Amino acid sequence: MQPIAWQISLVLMALVAFGFAFVAINSGRRQEDYSPLQKSAYRLRSRLFWGLVLVFGPAMIYTLFELPYDAARANTGAGPVQVVDATGYQWRWELSQDQFAVGQPVEFRVTSADVNHGFGIYDANLHLVAQTQAMPGYTNTLRHTFSEEGTYKILCMEYCGLAHHNMLTEIRVGAQ
């Protein structure tokens, strides 16, 4: 599903770019009808537009390389992918495995048995390292390769009821 969303995004961005190019090319035809003040304003707008295209166009393309949709990129660690089933319940997480090796890719298959939950993995300093949504009837895939040993916490990131603040579990990452 995510690769399809990425491809659709690329097609839509190309359509928007072609629309801007079409308008920019055809907008110069009536320039002779403008007063000198309007012509200078038009030139300023044109320069501003192309300046923005030159600044934000490459930035937009560069950020596409960082999208997390490429499964092959996520498998950059040593060894096979460890697959973990993660299910959110009010007010606990149930994991099929809670110990992982450093540098070995992990694929979390995250779902919910009841309501929406946010599946957030935090390091020892409580910095968010990866996250996805846990939804009933749907499985989200989260791929992550842990680069440091330690104990990581999995916390719910979406209010799910009275005991939401107690919805956490720990995983251990070590050398194996």
Image (cartoon, grey):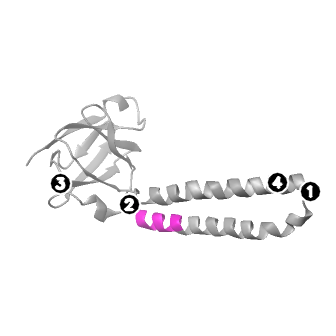
Mark pair 3, 1: CA separation: 66 Å
Which amino acid is tagged 4? Ser
Residue 99 is a magenta residue: no
Label 4, secondary structure: give it: helix
Q: Which residue is mark 1?
A: 35
Cα distance between the residues tagged 2 and 4: 45 Å
Frontmost residue, 7 versus 168: 7
Element on which disc 2 rests = loop
Q: Type of residue at label 1?
A: Ser
The residue indicated by pointer 4 is: 40
Mark 2 = which residue?
Answer: 69
Marked residue nearer the N-terminal end (2 or 4):
4
Which quadrant: the N terminus?
bottom left
Dot in front, 3 or 1: 1
Q: What's the CA distance linking mark 1 and mark 2? A: 51 Å
User: CB atoms at circles 3 and 2 under 8 Å apart?
Assistant: no
Q: Which residues are magenta?
A: 1-10
Residue 156 position, x and y percent, is 35, 38
Residue of label 3 = 104
Asked whether the viewer can see residue 1, the reply is no
Q: Position of residue 120 (x, y in %)?
A: 33, 41
